[in-house]
Amino acid sequence: MESLLENQRSAHEERERITDSITKEFLAEKRTHKARINSDQRVKKLLERYEKLTEELEVAYKDENNGRSAELEAIAGPNEFAEFYSRLKSLKDAHRKNPDEVASPLSMEYQHMNEILEDPDRVEQELVRFTDEEGYGRFLDLHVLYDAYINLKGIKRVDYLQFLSILERFVDIPKDAKKTGAYKNYLTQLEDYLKAFIARTKPLLDLDGTLQQADSDSARLFVQGGLPGWAKPQSANDGTSIDLSQFASSSDLEALGLERLKNALLALGLKCGGTLKDRAERLFATKGHSLSEMEKKALRSDMDKENAKNEGLAKSEERIKKMVEILGEEREATKENTERKQARAVGEGEEEEEEIEEIPSDEEVDDSVPYNPKNLPLGWDGKPIPYWLYKLHGLNISYSCEICGNQTYKGPKAFQRHFTEWRHSHGMRCLGIPNTPHFANITKIADAVELWQKMKSEKERHKWDADVHEEYEDSAGNVVNKRTYEDLKRQGLL
């Protein structure tokens, strides 16, 4: 067991090496977008390790259990040589028990990290996971959230490009008509995705602090009624009361109008929605009655719940607005990428569906990877084959096989070869059909099943039948089948 002082010394050394590694990380040249993302992720991990070591040192220096003081006293007291030999014996015993174990010093570990960092031709690994649509953090992938948005009640249908433009414009959504439970789920999913995306692309950003500030601002503005799209929270004292003794029926109250009746209902803490007739009847029903303290308390409780729900929705909206503002560049890049996709011709979209969506700029050229915008196959020299050869072999033509689970194959050669490969054979086994040459070039499940039924019926028709196919010969040398021979025998004509 290492001593407390040695652990402290090791923590201080590692903190210094972490500081040195972070400095070299910032000074290193990043040629590509992927390199910048990976660099920030490595710095984030180093900072987390630095904070953990700092916490351990703080606990050690506080010395609440007096372990550090006891150790200092032991090595500086009158029996310091006894303590020295005792620790030396412990080290020898540990080495004798594990003679082949070699400790790796911190200097070797961090030196290896720095050597990798200083290599300009290094191949960047994927340190974080992104979808293909996100392009390793260049673009946002909001297709799932777009589907959730257009399925909200009463939402005007827009295309994906328009959705990207109105992502944070919640004020255009009427509060009473459309901000229901489904809307809350949509906000939660959108907020979670944006937080996860920022954590992957901007790990050094203090997102928690930014969102806490947004929460405090939104809470203050919500109470003041200053949030766009959200009125001031209601209370049982809002509105103006009406002297109902002057009205003989609910129809007389209708003359006051919708807004006047709404204010009167608010003053009583009652529901204020509905048509003009509904509001008048609801208000006239209170004539001659006074709400008890328990009823008023229940009404106030309902209002508090409604206000709390609205405040939660408003807070989520403000958090999303703040995160969309942080991701302004990524959103604009996503819009440009979407426009570029939509501008493709129909044939081009089919032939070049694997084309890289963004042509790298001069600052983002990675010399280790050949420029290949059409995603052509690589030749023997590691470079993309010529485009004429790509077209000659028909690799621009895609074939789909339903039996293989709608797998797509590029070019006629790969398409013909796949009929003998495991994926197609597995699909045929799942259908209960043998993968024989009879089913070559058949890709539809219905066609394969129909041909198999026809083959089985044909096989049944040609199945061996003793009465028809078994032959007999009489004494005169005449050859007949079994059924004819039995008939002649019964008639005594043989």
Image (spheres, grey):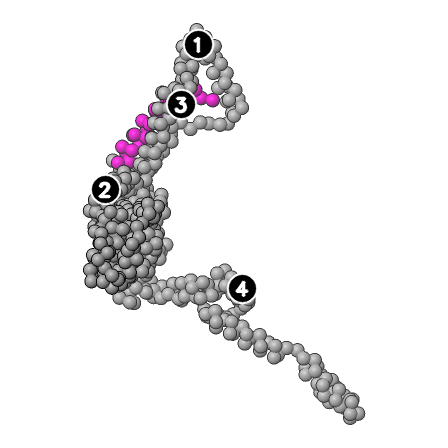
**Which callout, 3 or 1, points at the residue further toward the start of the chain?**
3
The residue depicted at 20 percent of the width and 60 percent of the height is 256
Mark 3 nearby-residue class (10 Å; few <14, some 14–19, many ≥20):
some
Q: Which residue is mark 4?
A: 429
Q: Which residue is mark 2?
A: 220
The residue depicted at 36 percent of the width and 47 percent of the height is 129
Mark 4 nearby-residue class (10 Å; few <14, some 14–19, many ≥20):
few
> What's drawn in magenta, residue-wise?
1-26
* Mark 4 residue type: Arg
Q: Which residue is mark 1?
A: 80
Q: Nearer the viewer, mark 3 or mark 2?
A: 2
**Which callout, 3 or 4, points at the residue further toward the start of the chain?**
3
Q: From what the image shows, is residue 410 above or below residue 466? A: above
Q: Which residue is mark 3?
A: 7
Residue 412 seen: yes
Q: Which element is circle 1 on?
A: helix
Left-right relation of 361 to 80: left
**Pointers 3 and 4 in contact (C-beta within 8 Å):** no
Q: Quadrant of residue 58?
A: top left
Please state which of residues 110 and 143 is positioned toward the viewer in this rendering: 143
Specify whether residue 69 is painted magenta: no
